[in-house]
Image (tube, rainbow, N blue to C red):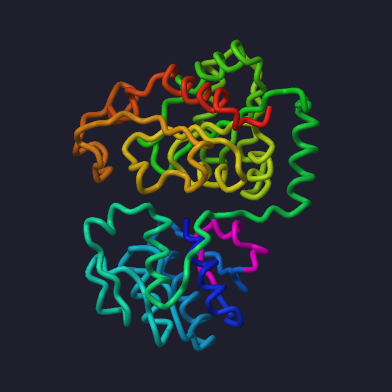
Amino acid sequence: MGIPAMTALRKRYPGAHITAVVKVPGNEILKGNPVVNEVIPYQDRRDRYNRLIDSIRIIRYLRKKDIDVAVVFPNSFRSALMVLMIGARYRIGHVTDGRGVFLTTGIKVTDYERNKHRVEYFLDIVRAIGCKTPHKRPFLRLHPEKRRFALNYLHESGVSDRDLLIGIHPGASKPPRAWSSERFGRLCQRLYREFNAKIILFGGSDDKGTVSGIEANTKERLITAVGDTDLMQMAALIERCHIFVGNDSGIMHIAAMVKTPVVAIFGPGIPEKTCPFCSREKIEIVSKDYPCSPCRQRFFKECKPSINNKPPCIEDIEVADVMRGIERLIERGVVRY
């Protein structure tokens, strides 16, 4: 969601050397993208010691570059402190978490700003330094090698051009944000029975347990690309899908960036702020309007967990709700099948 802001920076300063510090594996998205000259991967490690070592390494490297301007997209205290420590002359970002003392240009966050879509929220940062922002949709550059990989992978998996291919990503950044594997399994059964669809599952190695749960709840043969691909190979496979179904996650945004119609399952997230920033006709949001929304996602201090250890806003989404989203995309004529 920060790519449109980076694009605006490049257009405003075409001759600048732009270095992006990006969390792994998101750094793969910017490799080869002309909006930046250099990408530094940042491993957000769980243990504090190794996280500190990584931060020191990046700070030392960037101090040698004599940075003129640092643009801070994350709202965290640590990110603003880091750009101060690298010695950037001008430091621009939102004034949150008491970090205004670290910024030379601080953008106040009103309730209106706080509730903006994140694409617009990030664009506000670069607007503060004179960037124009006519092009707002995130885009992804896929190398031909990644597209060849996707074609070969699907061919070897028995997928032909005549098949309706539906991609599913069952993972989420936090388990309570994810729809249950049992319901994903029942969804797969209905997709096979009603559309004779081929179904491919996406995710990283951390999602293998969830995928096992899906496979246990369906009798149909699924194509499992979980843990088999890097991020851009996954993006190329999603591009070949006719429909993508997934939770509120980064992979959901990648699906929109490669222009695949999306059915996005939102529980405790806020669609108005983080839904895919794409053509409205190519997305269906499936969510329940709860009076406690938006919540702080401090599971489970604000609500009681269900039997599946989910908050009620995600637990109450039924298979039929997601099927209706898929059917609406097909009826709308945006599915390339």
Along the line of sight, which residue is nearer the eye, 99 or 259? 259
Residue at 47% x, 70% y: name it.
132
State left or right for residue 111 relative to residue 280: left
State left or right for residue 97 relative to residue 230: left
Q: Which residues are magenta?
A: 19-34
Residue 317 at x, y = what percent? 37, 23
Which quadrant does the C terminus fall into?
A: top right
Residue at 46% x, 32% y: name it.
284
Residue 67 at x, y = what percent? 48, 85
Along the line of sight, which residue is nearer the eye, 85 or 259? 259
Q: Is 291 rendered above or below residue 144?
A: above
Q: Is 217 rendered above or below residue 238?
A: above
Q: Based on the displayed image, in which of its 4 quarters is residue 192 positioned?
A: top right
* Magenta stretch contains residue 28: yes
Residue at 28% x, 27% y: name it.
312
Residue at 66% x, 15% y: name it.
196
Along the line of sight, which residue is nearer the eye, 59 or 314? 314
Residue 259 at x, y = what percent? 60, 43
